[in-house]
Image (spheres, rainbow, N blue to C red):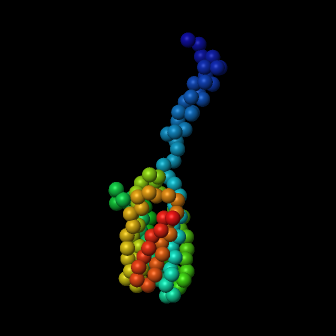
Amino acid sequence: MDLTRRTFVTGGTLFVCGLSGCLETNQGEITLSIENESPSPRSVTLTVEQLTKADILFKTSIELTGDDGTEITRTVPRNDDLLLLVSTDAGVEDTFEWTEVKSALTIRITNDIIEFDTA
């Protein structure tokens, strides 16, 4: 069978289109808003792990003044459940299993509790 231009273009197009699914990234961005609702400054440590593998995706420490907040944007694997571990220098700590990971999560820190809000 002779290789014609039409056969080559059609075959090449199908090959590239077929690969496009393989080349799609399995990563997505999340934004974590961390709000210190206490009047006192807080040192906050945040660790984010893959829930099923217990692999640490990232860990960071943040200094927040009283009634202050910040946002962190990171790239994480899509379709993975995450475990967030949050602790403060005041001894307040909590964990959150983020099983329906969307693009944003708010973490509110008061004098004695940490709240997680996916809305």
Whether 102 is drawn above or below 92: the answer is above
Residue that lies at the very extreme toward the bottom in this rendered image:
40
**Residue 20 in view (yes/no):** yes
Write the residue at 52% across / 42% down. Answer: 23
Whether 23 is drawn above or below 55: the answer is above
**Where in the figure is residue 90, as x and y percent of width and height?**
40, 84
Q: Is 91 in front, or is 24? A: 91
Residue that lies at the very extreme toward the left in this rendered image:
53
Residue that lies at the very extreme toward the top in this rendered image:
1
Residue that lies at the very extreme toward the front in this rendered image:
119
Horizontal relation, residue 21 to residue 51: left or right: right
Write the residue at 36% across / 59% down. Answer: 51
Horizontal relation, residue 16 to residue 108: left or right: right
**Where in the figure is residue 105, as x and y percent of width and height?**
50, 66
Q: Is 21 in front, or is 99? A: 99
Write the residue at 59% across / 13% down. Answer: 2
Give the quadrant of the N terminus: top right
Write the residue at 41% across / 73% down. Answer: 86
Report how many numbered discs are placed on residues in the image. 0
**Residue 56 in view (yes/no):** no
Q: Is 7 in front, or is 118? A: 118
Q: Is 8 in front, or is 94? A: 94
The quadrant where residue 46 appears: bottom left
